[in-house]
């Protein structure tokens, strides 16, 4: 078992992290902003897109992972019921909008219209798998 560990220090790195966390599921209660240390963290069950699959082998898996951003000056949510910690969110993508480079806004987009906007000094993110894999019953699909 190879545990994934990625670091993002610019918008290109962040797009790679975004691809690896697409369709990750988490609960609202797994979101944590720590202003004293300028960190935003979330624990998730990510779909393992990088796992090999072939015509005869349809193996889908998920792994528990932690994604955290450092140098976060503020965090805002939209369309997320923070008073419902057991509500499940599905992460679609992460993007960066530069304001005064290297500062900007990291936006985490969730299905159903939810979003988190992180005001950051610069991009500094880490994604790490923290546990073993388990079989996922289905593969996420995004139809046209």
Image (spheres, rainbow, N blue to C red):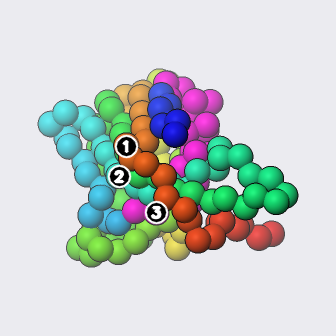
Q: Position of residue 77 (x, y in %)?
A: 36, 60
Work out whether residue 25 or residue 2 is closer to the camera in this orientation and state it.
2
Q: Are marks 3 and 1 in contact (CB under 8 Å)?
A: no
Q: Are marks 2 and 1 in contact (CB under 8 Å)?
A: yes
In this view, the mark in front (2 or 1)? 1
Q: CA distance from mark 2 to mark 3?
A: 9 Å
Name the residue located 30 percent from the left edge and 58 percent from the top edge. Answer: 30
Q: Quadrant of the C terminus?
A: bottom right
Q: Residues within 10 Å of mark 3 (few under 14, many from 20)?
A: many
The segment highlighted magenta reads 8-26
In this view, the mark in front (3 or 1)? 1
Q: Position of residue 87 (x, y in %)?
A: 35, 74
Up-down: is 135 above or below 68?
below
Q: Position of residue 95 (x, y in %)?
A: 56, 44
**Magenta span contains residue 16:** yes
Give me the disc on residue 130.
1
Name the residue located 48 percent from the left edge and 52 percent from the top edge. Answer: 133
Up-down: is 88 above or below 116?
below
Q: Are marks 2 and 3 in contact (CB under 8 Å)?
A: no
Which residue is under mark 3? 25
User: Does residue 67 appear in this view?
Assistant: no
Name the residue located 84 percent from the left edge and 58 percent from the top edge. Answer: 55
Q: Residues within 10 Å of mark 1 (few under 14, many from 20)?
A: some
């Amino acid at each position: 078992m190879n545990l994934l560990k990625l670091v993002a220090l610019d918008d290109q790195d962040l797009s790679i992290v975004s691809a690896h966390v697409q369709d990750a599921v988490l609960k609202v209660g797994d979101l944590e902003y720590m202003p004293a240390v300028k960190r935003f963290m979330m624990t998730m069950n990510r779909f393992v897109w990088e796992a090999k699959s072939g015509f005869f082998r349809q193996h889908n898996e998920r792994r528990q992972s932690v994604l955290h951003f450092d140098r976060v000056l503020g965090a805002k949510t939209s369309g997320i019921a923070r008073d419902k910690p057991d509500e499940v969110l599905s992460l679609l993508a992460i993007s960066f909008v530069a304001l005064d480079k290297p500062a900007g806004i990291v936006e985490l987009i969730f299905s159903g219209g939810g979003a988190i906007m992180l005001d950051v000094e610069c991009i500094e993110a880490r994604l790490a798998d923290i546990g073993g894999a388990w079989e996922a019953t289905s593969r996420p699909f995004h139809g046209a």
